[in-house]
């Protein structure tokens, strides 16, 4: 992480081996992990800021006393969530639940849809861009809520939700088909109807968090879901990540403790036991001692 942060934007893209490897082995050409079209026209300073936001997708506190920076952020506001503070993911999900259940209850067609089937994936998506306190930035620069709630939050969130359920659930199951149809209906409402009336709880929360830059010296900032979705490629065919098959032995010989290799995490429902085949007797002994402590 520290090495990545030392690089500027262009070094981050050109010298990061993971980003340069093709992600997908289907289609006419290999698919790169990271697409940068959204950032091409940004100033060099803004690109370096974007690099920091890509390394850590969570919230960042940013000093914005410089008027030039405020101007550039405003010009590129479609890329970011911005606010004076972060908000709990659970509070956002609560607003989504309120809005989505109201929409569901207006149609007999979707009466059998259970919000919990959606909740599990929404929680996963939003937690993936949260900070250590499970909070994210939720708002937009200069309070253009109507357009940007749909464009930067609702539509990309629901689209990712649709993708996840298609991938991880049986889309031929009748309940899943109904759920997917309902999500498409939600996307349609987000894109083509008044979000203030269709998603009032989310609208109020997003409006409350939105910020006028000219009034602030510091803000919380992070890339929004649309920018992330348009930048980080999703594999469609079989993933192709050659770095994952590189020999582990050279790296293992560099560490002096088993704790540098494994982080143990147990719960009442599952237990993972790894039994490696180390030629290094000291490292193997350290592993055996660690196992006895579990």
Image (cartoon, grey):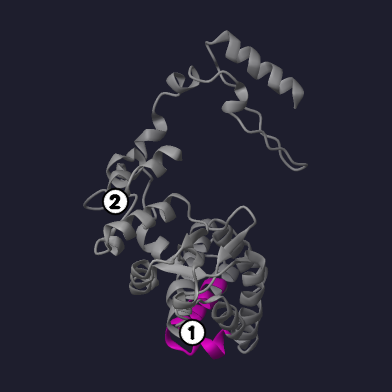
Image spot of residue 280 (x, y percent):
54, 11
Q: Say whether residue 129 is left or right of residue 10.
A: right
Q: Nearer the viewer, residue 45 or 258?
A: 45
Q: Nearer the viewer, residue 17 or 190?
A: 17
Q: Secondary structure at mark 1?
A: helix
Q: Look at 39% across and 66% down and name the residue there.
A: 66
Residue that carries the numbered disc 1 in the rendered image: 189
Residue 195 at least partly seen? yes
Q: Look at 45% across and 66% down and name the residue there.
A: 224
Residue 262 falls within the magenta-colored stretch: no
The crowd level at tag 1 (other Cα within 10 Å; few <14, some 14-19, many 20+) is: some
> Going from the N terminus, do you reach mark 1 or mark 2 first?
2
Residue 103 in which image quadrant: bottom right
Residue at the extreme right: 268
Q: Nearer the viewer, residue 108 or 96?
A: 96
Q: Say whether residue 133 is left or right of residue 180.
A: right
Q: Say whether residue 47 is left or right of residue 270.
A: left
Residue that carries the numbered disc 2 in the rendered image: 31
Residue 141 at least partly seen? no
Image spot of residue 120 (x, y percent):
63, 62
Image spot of residue 151 (x, y percent):
42, 76
Image spot of residue 158 (x, y percent):
50, 71
In this picture, is 137 found above or below 215? Answer: above
In this picture, is 6 found above or below 252? Answer: below
What segment is highlighted magenta in the picture?
179-199
The crowd level at tag 2 (other Cα within 10 Å; few <14, some 14-19, many 20+) is: many
Magenta-drawn stretch, dominant element (helix, strand or loop): helix
In this picture, is 169 found above or below 78? Answer: above
Residue 123 in which image quadrant: bottom right
Q: Secondary structure at mark 2?
A: strand
Q: Mark on residue 93?
A: none
């Amino acid at each position: 992480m520290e090495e990545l942060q030392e690089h500027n934007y262009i070094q981050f893209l050109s010298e990061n081996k993971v980003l340069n490897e093709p992600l997908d082995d289907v289609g006419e050409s290999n698919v790169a992990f990271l697409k940068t079209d959204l950032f091409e026209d940004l100033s060099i300073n803004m690109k370096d800021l974007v690099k920091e936001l890509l390394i850590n997708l969570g919230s960042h506190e940013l000093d914005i006393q410089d008027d030039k920076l405020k101007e550039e952020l405003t010009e590129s506001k479609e890329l970011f969530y911005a606010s004076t503070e972060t908000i709990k993911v659970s509070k956002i999900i609560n607003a989504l639940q309120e809005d989505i259940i109201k929409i569901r209850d207006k149609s007999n067609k979707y009466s059998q849809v259970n919000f919990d089937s959606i909740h599990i994936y929404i929680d996963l998506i939003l937690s993936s861009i949260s900070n250590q306190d499970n909070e994210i930035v939720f708002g937009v620069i200069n309070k253009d809520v109507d357009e940007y709630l749909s464009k930067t939050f609702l539509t990309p969130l629901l689209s990712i939700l649709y993708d996840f359920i298609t991938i991880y659930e049986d889309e031929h199951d009748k309940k899943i088909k109904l759920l997917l149809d309902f999500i498409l209906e939600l996307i349609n409402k987000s894109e083509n109807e008044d979000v203030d009336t269709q998603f009032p709880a989310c609208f109020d929360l997003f409006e409350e968090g939105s910020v006028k830059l000219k009034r602030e010296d510091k803000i919380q900032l992070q890339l929004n879901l649309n920018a992330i979705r348009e930048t980080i490629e999703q594999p469609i065919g079989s993933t192709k990540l050659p770095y994952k098959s590189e020999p582990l032995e050279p790296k293992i010989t560099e560490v002096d403790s088993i704790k540098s290799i494994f982080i143990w995490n147990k719960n009442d429902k599952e237990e993972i036991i790894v039994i490696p085949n180390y030629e290094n007797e000291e490292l193997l002994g350290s592993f055996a001692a660690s196992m006895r402590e579990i």
